[in-house]
Image (cartoon, helix red, strand yellow):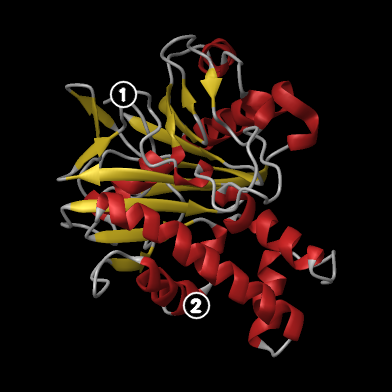
Amino acid sequence: MLRIGIDLGGTKTEGIVMDGNGKILVRERRATPQAGGYEAILVNIRDLALDLERRAGASCAIGIGTPGAISTRTGFLKNSNTVCLNGQPVKQDLEKMLAREIRIANDANCFALSEALDGAAQGEPVVFGVILGTGVGGGIVVNGRLLEGAQHIAGEWGHNVLEPDGPPCYCGKRGCVETFLSGPGLARDFTAHGGDATRDARAIATAAGQGDVLAEAAMQRYLDRFGRALSAVINILDPDAIVLGGGMSNIARLYTDGRACAGCHVFNDELRTRILRTCMAIAPACVVRRNSGHLRLAKNSSPASLCAA
């Protein structure tokens, strides 16, 4: 069966159709209609899925990777930085709209599993997959198996408090990692220190490389925070590899200066953990099979469809 994988992000919603051999047949990206709220986002997902299926010319299983997770207590979505989705029966409503059962899983978990089994960290025993984009998330894979945790929050480093007097976070705390290391977080910090409010994270990183003093100062703060936040994860998990994904992972200095900053705070006399760039074309809405309750990735698949086999 063909599979549709949809990656729901705060800025964009991207989908692919993948065949049984892991070949991507169709790809499409649309803006996520945040301003339209819950119904608009679900309609956008439905329309994208149906359009992909029409272009594929066959019925498809559908899987969706999203920030947050389905609560085992309520069955509703929790912990999404697209806050209008929280407390909503996302899976149930989409199943009604699409007239079939679908799979939903945390996007960072999907990303981590994909990179550990089929990507940049293939073969590494312990992998921490990081999403740095509109939000900040993480997933943990140990010996090829996803570690979700008793509360389905394993790897959620984005909501560890980095600076208690920092900006307010949608989760209710202040100074979470996400408020500093997300794209909007970098832009907010740059503006707070006198920078041009029209510049986004990409423009700030580019300007820093061109000698802009304010942009470089913002990048230095960003790299320091990246190192401090990531070192806390390394001290607890001690992963063999960390793979970075999401829009902010395109900042080349994360793999040099950022790694050096992390090394300054790790509880060891050296940092042996590899920090790697994703080799995937899109962040995975990934995975394709559940065996004994564990997500599994199809051999040679690309970051695509989180669907039942």
Q: Where the N terminus falls, by quadrant? A: top left
Q: Position of residue 9 (x, y in %)?
A: 59, 42
The residue shown at (67%, 62%) is: 186
Q: Can residue 213 be seen in this view?
A: yes
Q: Where the C terminus falls, by quadrant? A: top left
Tag 1: residue type?
Ala
The residue shown at (60%, 34%) is: 48
| Side of 159 relative to 145 (left or right) | right
Q: Can residue 304 be seen in this view?
A: no
Residue under pointer 2: 253
Q: Nearer the viewer, residue 83 or 292?
A: 83
Q: Nearer the viewer, residue 224 or 98?
A: 224
Residue under pointer 1: 150
Task: Name the element at disc 1.
Answer: loop
Q: How dense is the environment of label 2, judged by Cα within 10 Å: few (below 14), some, or many (20 and up)?
A: some
Q: Where is residue 287 in the image (x, y as percent from the top left)?
A: 33, 37
Q: Quadrant of residue 276?
A: bottom left
Q: Where is residue 66 in the image (x, y as percent from the top left)?
A: 51, 34
Mark 2 and mark 1: Cα distance apart in space: 35 Å
Tag 2: residue type?
Arg
